[in-house]
Image: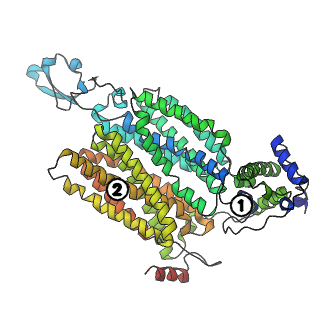
């Protein structure tokens, strides 16, 4: 009773706007505004916050569009290496500077201008690697900056490795920091750090610093992606939350589509980074309209009154924008105080080991989902870098095609999730297996003698189809991962699966080095991984447990197996 009375005379005092709205509510004669809100039917969040926010509205739409924007610079920083370090053609665009080896008559340059055979008269010959080059191309790339034109593939792989390593570190760090910092604070930290890293990357001319800054930029991107996901998961509900999860990667695909336009006409790699930096200012400008997670503020603030006050501020803004201010009652502070106590009394999330303590079928599903997402993330990154194999003159069109393929894959995941329901896993996995098999025949077509335009078109088609299948299955897994375990284990499973996948994602950039043997070899390797991921996805089953029935019980597993045979 003491805690309950503490909120009876509570008034927020942070802003005048908040005071005016609450004063209106407390003195309103409208009976609807003073009634206790009815219980909602949302099985996941049956509380006063859901009652006021609703499943979706104009405020949520505005917030989603703002939060989704972080995916665009994340895609740019992932894929910009395609345009900042393109392949160069020997003799046409660069030649070896043989002045360091003595007179030109004493040296013979290899066809790729990477090695020089130097004559030492009677002493014989020596094969030396060229260290300095003369450039004739108009675009000044990163490989020209570091004189790595002969190691371009290795440079791209190593630089991309540090970006992927930053995504791994950023995901883990953002999840752990969310225990003490609000999602909005992490989101703001991410955009400001990304702005600084982007500025520095456009100025540094040291290879080690370049790799370090790429890593920090990826950490910042992951801060924004992870915190943004947490925010819109909290302010939406029902099918709208699921739809938001499925469409989150559509803005990643939009970033790929916009990247060629951003890089078009840039005279050097530095100007590309300047364009990316200026674009980040849009997100900085929208920060005042970026919401925070109301439940995080209510549950994790040490000061009870401050937590309730901030939550009330978020709810009032949402209710005013959605036109549902009548749902805010004079009992709101007391109800939020009770909700805070209830949230803090909830059982802690399950440990990682507890995920594997179910029956054999349940553990098999967990192995399958770990393998599926890992293979899809590896392929998603690898196929994006694979577009370099189709020639620099087709880089713009190929990047656009990959972006469109990813967007179509996300839309297909949305369609399958809502139309096929329980069998969505089998549809997504079957699609991945089919296009993986189609893409694998590129190894046979590589031996055929056909016009160049046909070969490039088939190669692009066999890379775009797996990209669409991967985007479809990956979006579905990330959005519907919670269907495989009880609610108390969803956070643990999500962290485990995504972290495991990002560890394996580190190998994606080095798999692209297979293109030095044959572009068809690297593409076939990725298609085989798509088939493996599709097989694992087909093994997933949405679990429906009765209340009180433990995960992995013999009765439940038998019912599920009967339903799918």
Mark linked to residue 475: none
- Vertical side of 533 occupied by 79: above or below: above
- Vertical side of 550 occupied by 452: above or below: above
Instruction: Give the percent coordinates (x, y) of residue 246.
Output: 52, 58
Q: Nearer the viewer, residue 223 or 427?
A: 427
Could you tell me which quadrant the N terminus lies in?
Answer: bottom right
> Which colour assignment does the render follow?
rainbow
- Vertical side of 40 occupied by 317: above or below: above
Q: At x 35% / y 37%, what residue is drawn?
A: 155
Q: At x 55% / y 34%, what residue is drawn?
A: 195
Residue 435 in which image quadrant: bottom left
Classify 10 Å Cα crowding around label 2: few (below 14), some (14-19), many (20 and above).
many
- Vertical side of 181 occupied by 121: above or below: above
Residue matched to label 1: 50
Instruction: Give the percent coordinates (x, y) of residue 500.
Output: 48, 56
> Dot 2 lies on which element?
helix
Q: At x 52% / y 32%, what residue is drawn?
A: 277
> Dot 1 lies on which element?
helix
Residue matched to label 2: 465
Q: Nearer the viewer, residue 178 or 438?
A: 438
């Amino acid at each position: 009773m003491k805690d309950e009375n503490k909120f009876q005379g509570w008034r927020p005092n942070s802003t005048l706007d908040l005071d005016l709205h609450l004063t209106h509510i407390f003195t309103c004669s409208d009976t609807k505004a003073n009634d206790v809100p009815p219980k909602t039917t949302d099985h996941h969040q049956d509380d006063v916050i859901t009652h006021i926010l609703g499943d979706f509205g104009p405020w949520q739409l505005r917030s989603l569009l703002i939060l989704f924007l972080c995916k665009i610079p994340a895609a740019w920083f992932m894929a910009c290496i395609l345009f900042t370090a393109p392949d160069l053609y020997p003799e046409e665009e660069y030649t070896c500077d043989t002045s360091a080896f003595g007179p030109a008559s004493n040296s013979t340059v290899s066809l790729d201008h990477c090695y020089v055979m130097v004559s030492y008269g009677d002493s014989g010959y020596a094969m030396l690697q060229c260290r300095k080059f003369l450039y004739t191309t108009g675009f000044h790339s990163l490989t020209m900056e570091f004189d790595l034109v002969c190691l371009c593939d290795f440079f791209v792989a190593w630089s991309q490795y540090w970006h992927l390593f930053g995504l791994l570190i950023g995901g883990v760090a953002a999840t752990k920091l969310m225990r003490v910092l609000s999602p909005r604070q992490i989101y703001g930290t991410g955009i400001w750090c990304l702005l600084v890293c982007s500025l520095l990357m456009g100025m540094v001319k040291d290879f080690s610093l370049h790799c370090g800054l790429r890593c920090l930029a990826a950490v910042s991107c992951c801060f924004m992606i992870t915190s943004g996901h947490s925010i819109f998961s909290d302010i939406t509900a029902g099918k709208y939350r699921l739809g938001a999860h499925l469409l989150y990667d559509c803005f990643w695909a939009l970033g790929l589509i916009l990247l060629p336009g951003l890089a078009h006409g840039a005279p050097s790699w530095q100007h590309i980074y300047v364009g990316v930096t200026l674009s980040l200012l849009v997100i900085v400008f929208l920060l005042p309209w970026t919401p925070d997670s109301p439940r995080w503020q209510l549950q994790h603030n040490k000061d009870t009154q401050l937590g309730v006050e901030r939550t009330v501020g978020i709810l009032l803004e949402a209710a005013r924008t959605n036109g549902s201010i009548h749902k805010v009652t004079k009992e709101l502070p007391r109800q939020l105080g009770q909700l805070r106590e209830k949230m803090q009394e909830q059982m802690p999330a399950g440990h990682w080991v507890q995920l594997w303590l179910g029956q054999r079928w349940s553990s098999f599903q967990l192995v399958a989902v770990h393998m599926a997402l890992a293979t899809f993330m590896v392929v998603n990154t690898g196929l994006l870098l694979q577009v370099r194999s189709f020639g620099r003159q087709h880089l713009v069109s190929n990047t656009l095609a990959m972006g469109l393929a990813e967007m179509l894959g996300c839309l297909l995941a949305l369609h399958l999730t809502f139309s096929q329901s329980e069998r969505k896993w089998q549809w997504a996995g079957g699609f991945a297996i089919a296009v993986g098999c189609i893409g694998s025949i590129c190894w046979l077509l590589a031996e055929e003698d056909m016009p160049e335009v046909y070969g490039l078109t088939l190669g692009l088609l066999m890379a775009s189809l797996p990209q669409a299948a991967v985007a479809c299955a990956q979006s579905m897994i990330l959005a519907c991962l919670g269907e495989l375990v009880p609610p108390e284990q969803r956070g643990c499973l999500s962290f485990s699966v995504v972290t495991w996948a990002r560890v394996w994602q580190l190998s994606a950039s080095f798999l692209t080095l297979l293109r030095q043997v044959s572009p068809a070899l690297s593409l076939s390797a990725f298609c085989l991984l798509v088939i493996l991921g599709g097989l694992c996805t087909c093994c997933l089953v949405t679990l429906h447990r009765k209340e009180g029935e433990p995960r992995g019980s013999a009765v439940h597993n038998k019912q599920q197996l009967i339903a799918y045979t």
